[in-house]
Amino acid sequence: DGGITQSPKYLFRKEGQNVTLSCEQNLNHDAMYWYRQDPGQGLRLIYYSQIVNDFQKGDIAEGYSVSREKKESFPLTVTSAQKNPTAFYLCASSIEDSQFVYTQHFGDGTRLSIL
Amino acid sequence: AQSVTQLGSHVSVSEGALVLLRCNYSSSVPPYLFWYVQYPNQGLQLLLKYTTGATLVKGINGFEAEFKKSETSFHLTKPSAHMSDAAEYFCAVSGTNYGQNFVFGPGTRLSVLP
């Protein structure tokens, strides 16, 4: 079945450590996204990528980095510069449909906590 | 700029009662509108979407929503709540350019009481 796979489901980070969250999709979607979810704040866009080797900052990119070397993969690195990384991270992807709409489809998320 | 407001961060209904979750949006262009559902520790699942055409949109699990341009609203309803409907619901608005301006509302947590 086609879908978006995020791993790991739970991740723990020590102070000063970088961690990388994985996102893989087999939907053949062009665009991919990373969101951060905090209680009561909805989803906030971190980074997005429209095509391979290209990505743009979202609303809260500071302390995060991404790469898009393959169409299927869009890993997110949470760097030590991100002072409050504890959150639920969601990866999404989209492709233009027959109605010219980019509906976003989501993975099951990674919960990151600080030790 | 686009924005979404959802009235009520928490809504409680009795099992079998009507579910009404409110969503209002602002957009400078004709919007595409979406409702997603999220169960605990899971990702978001698309319930329904409005693009063009018929303003009453039917989705999965018996939910439907009506686009009212004059009221800039896209409220989500279900005639009879089921215990399995308890979840967080997000309204979102999008333009037409790769979805990078996909804006989510803050969410409404629905509780269903026996």
Image (tube, grey):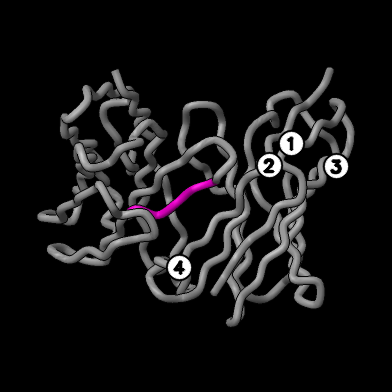
Spatial distance from mark 2 to mark 3, Cα to Cα?
18 Å
Circle on res. B101: 4
Residue B1 location, quadrant: bottom right
Q: Are marks 1 and 2 in contact (CB under 8 Å)?
A: yes
Residue type highlighted by circle 1: His
Ranked by sequence position, the earlier of labels 1 and 2 is 1
Element type where label 2 sits in the image: strand
Circle on res. B10: 1
Between A37 and A95, which is closer to the camera in this rendering?
Answer: A37
x, y percent for residue B21: 76, 47
Ranked by sequence position, the earlier of labels 4 and 3 is 3
Element type where label 1 sits in the image: strand
Spatial distance from mark 4 to mark 3, Cα to Cα?
32 Å
Q: Are marks 2 and 3 in contact (CB under 8 Å)?
A: no
Spatial distance from mark 4 to mark 1, Cα to Cα?
26 Å
**Residue pictured at 30% horizontal, 35% vertical:** A6
Compared across the picture, whether B2 is left or right of A95 comes to right
In the picture shown, does residue B17 fall above or below A44? above
Q: Which residue is mark 2?
A: B108
